[in-house]
Image (tube, rainbow, N blue to C red):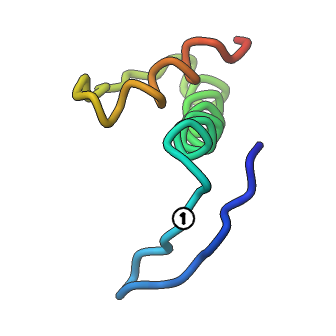
Amino acid sequence: MHKPIRTFTSGVAQVEIYQNRRHAGDAAAEMASEIIRNAVDSQKKARIIVATGNSQLDVIDSLASLPG
């Protein structure tokens, strides 16, 4: 997984800045994949809603390429 080049907190949100959109998409997909796997492990199913705007395409591509 790509490492953020900068992290900080804004209010209660933890913000991570990545080198480029692809790295940000890969990192977001890895985090989402872990959450989805945990839901499937504990509840035997998971439902997700995926945004389809241009800003989300890197996340969708990365998520679709992950195993499982």
Comparing 41 with 62, the one in front is: 62
Crowding at mark 1 (Cα within 10 Å: few <14, some 14-19, many 20+): some
Quadrant for the C terminus, please. Answer: top right
Instruction: Give above or below for 7 relative to 32.
Output: below
Residue drawn at 31 percent across, 36 percent down:
55
Instruction: Give above or below for 38 relative to 18.
Output: above
* Displayed quadrant of residue 52: top left
Q: Position of residue 57 (x, y in %)?
A: 38, 24
Furthest-front residue in this view: 20
State left or right for residue 31 relative to residue 67: left
Comparing 45 with 58, the one in front is: 58
Comparing 44 with 46, the one in front is: 46
Residue drawn at 64 percent across, 12 percent down:
65
* Displayed quadrant of residue 66: top right
Q: Position of residue 32 (x, y in %)?
A: 54, 37
Comparing 40 with 61, the one in front is: 61
Residue drawn at 67 percent across, 67 percent down:
5
Residue drawn at 74 percent across, 57 percent down:
3
State left or right for residue 56 relative to residue 28: left
Instruction: Give above or below for 48 relative to 13.
Output: above
- Secondary structure under the numbered disc 1 in the rendered image: strand
The amino acid sitting under disc 1 is Ile
Residue underneath mark 1: 17
Quadrant for the N terminus, please. Answer: top right
Q: Position of residue 45 (x, y in %)?
A: 50, 17
